[in-house]
Image (cartoon, rainbow, N blue to C red):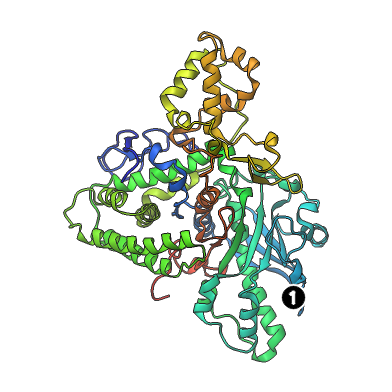
Amino acid sequence: MTEGRDRPAGAQEDGNAPLPDPGGPGDLGPAEDGRAGRGLWLRAPETVMRLARLGAFHQTRLSFLRATLRQVAAGGYRFGYERWEIGDGGVGAAVYAARGPERDYSLVCFAHDLDPAMRTDRVIAEAWDATFVLYDGIPDDSELDRLRANAPKQEAGRYRHTDLILSRANRSGRLYDHVVDCLAAGRQPAAARLDETGYVMRTTAVYGNGKFGIADRDRYAGRAGFGGPFRMEMLTVWMIRQFVADLVDHMARAGGGARAAPLDRALRRRLGIGNSTGLGLGPFIVNHPALFARWVECRELALARVCAQETASAETRREFRQWIARARADAAGWTVAEPVQAAKIARLSDDLGRLDAFAAGLGAEAAAPWARIRDWAAEHLSLEGQELAVSLLIEPHGGIVDDLADRMAVEETEILPAGLSGRVRDLRDLIEEEYGWALEPDYARPEAQARFWYVSANKLEPRLGERWEEPGAELELPLATGRDIAACHADLGKAAEDETLADFLLRHPEHRHTVRRLSDPDLGPYGHIRDNLVGAGLLPLDLLRCKLAFFGATHFDPKSDRWLRINMFRHAPYPDELQAGPPDDWIYPRPDG
C-alpha cells in the first residue's frame, strides 16, 4: 500500500521540451518543468521521507558517478600515463593525467607493501595497500616528492590547495591474490569467481571539501562539469579503478614473466571499486538538510517528468522492459550473507518478474503508461521493488531528466534564524500544522531515546551510542530532529504567544539549531526525515545506503546494522573505452556481456 497521496507541483505546458531554467542550474521552481499536458505530480514527502523507503533507494541516471562519466565524456577528456614507477614488488608511484578542455587533473597513486596483519577497513587504520591524491594539474618532481611524503600518511599528512581529493584503498583478501596468480600462470580467472566479490581493491575513505587541509570545494565547484555534488570524488574513484587494473596486470607480469596474461578486457569490466562504509557517513544527510532535500527533490522530479507523459513509443516501452531484464539478471548476482538483505533480494527478483509482466500487459493505447506502472508498483511490490521500479522508469528517459543532475548542488551558507521579530505563536502553529510526525512519539519512553549520536574523540568520526547502557550522552550531537522539534514545541507552548522568537531564544538557546532548521528557506518539501533518529527501532544502515545510492553504488552488502560494503563503477567503461560507446549504458550489463 502507498503511505500517502501524491501532490501536484505545478501545471505544465504542452510539448516535450523543458521550459527555460527559471534561475540557472542551481534553482528549482515549483513549475519549472513543462511536459506533455498533464499536471506534474510529486510523491508526497510523508511517503518518500521515511527511513525504510530511503534505505531502499537504488542508483539512478542522476547518481553522481553516472553524471560524472557523462560529463567527462561530453568534455572530451583524454586520459594517459604520466609516470609508472611501480617495482616488481608492487611498491612505487604512478601518475595518471586527465586532460580536459580547460583544465588538467592528475591521479597520483602510491602502492605500498602492507603487512597483511595491518590490513583493516576501520578508520583507525594507519597504513593501506595504496594511497591517492587527485591533483589540480600535472605535478612536477618537487610536487610528487611532497605528495610521496604526505599522501601515505593520509590524515596525518600536510596538504595544499592543489590537492583536491584524498583517498586510500586495500586489497580484497578474497580476490586480489587469486586474480594475480591466475594471470601470472597465463590463465584468466573465472567470471563467476570475480562476480562473487566484484572488486579486487576497495577504498576505505574518499575525502574532499577541505578535509585535513586539502582544497575546499569552492576552488573547483564553479568549473565546467564539476558543479554537481561529489564529482571530483567520483572522478577519483573511477581513475583509481584504472590504476588497480594496471597494478594487477603489472604484478602478474612480475610473477609470471613471459607466460603471464593480461586480464581479459571483458572480465576487467566486471570489476568495480569496492568501498567499506560505516557510521561516519550517516549524519551527513541530517547535517546538510537543504542539500539532501535537493537530491531527493531532483529524483522525484525526474520520476514526475517521466510519469507525466501521456504516451510512450514502442521503442521506449521495449527499452524499459530490457532494463527490467538487465536489472533482474543483476539481482541474481547480488548475493549477501546478511539474512534480512538476502530476503529482500529474493523478494526483489520476484518483484521484477511481476513488474515485467505488468508492463508487458499494458497495451500500446494505454494512457499515461509510466504513471500506471509507478502506481501499480506502489500497490504490489516491496519497498525494494518500488524504488528499483523508480530507477528503471527514469532509465530510458535521459533526454528529459539528465539536466537535473546539474541542479543537485546547493550553495550552503550558515542559516541564522529568520524572522526573529516573529512571534512564538507563529512557530508553534507552523510545527502543529506541518510537523505532526515529530510530535507523535512519546519521547519520555526509554525506547524513544534509546540511542545518541556523538563524535569519537580518537578519530573525530560520528558514532552511535546506547543511551541507557553507555556513557557520553551529554556529548550528544543535535541529530534527533523530531525529538528536538517536539521539545521546542513544548517550550513554545509555555511562552507568551506574542513573545518574539528572539526573546524566546535568549531564554532557550538550546533550541537555536531547531529554529534554524525550521527557518531554512531551501529545505522544500523533502527537508526532513520523518522518523525518530534516536529511537530503539533506528536502522542506521538506511541512512548509509540512501546516501550511497545517490553516489551510484550497487550491490549493497550489509555486515551489520552499522556498516556495509558496496561496489562502484562495476561494468563501467575504462578511460580508454569512454569514447567508444554511450557513456551511460552500463550500470546493469547486457545479458550478452
Residue visible at 59% across and 43% down in the picture: 284
Residue 410 in view here: no
Residue type pointed to by label 1 = Gly
Number of marks present in the image shown: 1
Circle 1 residue: 90
The image quarter in which residue 264 lies: bottom right
Q: Quadrant of the C terminus?
A: bottom left
Q: Secondary structure at mark 1?
A: loop
Is 297 on the left or on the right of 78, as rendered?
left
- Examine the rendered structure and indicate whether residue 63 appears above or below residue 506: below
Residue visible at 43% across and 65% down in the picture: 588
Residue visible at 54% across and 30% down in the picture: 444
Q: Position of residue 450 (x, y in %)?
A: 58, 40
- Examine the rendered structure and indicate whether residue 533 appears above or below residue 82: above
Q: Nearer the viewer, residue 72 or 157?
A: 157
Q: How many C-alpha atoms fall within 10 Å of the one at disc 1: few (<14), some, or many (≥20)?
A: some
| Residue furthest to the bottom | 259
The image quarter in which residue 384 lies: bottom left
- Examine the rendered structure and indicate whether residue 353 appears above or below residue 533: below
Q: Nearer the viewer, residue 111 or 139?
A: 111
Q: Position of residue 524 (x, y in %)?
A: 46, 32
Q: Nearer the viewer, residue 104 or 55?
A: 55
Q: Position of residue 506 (x, y in %)?
A: 65, 15
Residue 39 in view here: yes
Is 43 on the left or on the right of 572, as rendered?
left
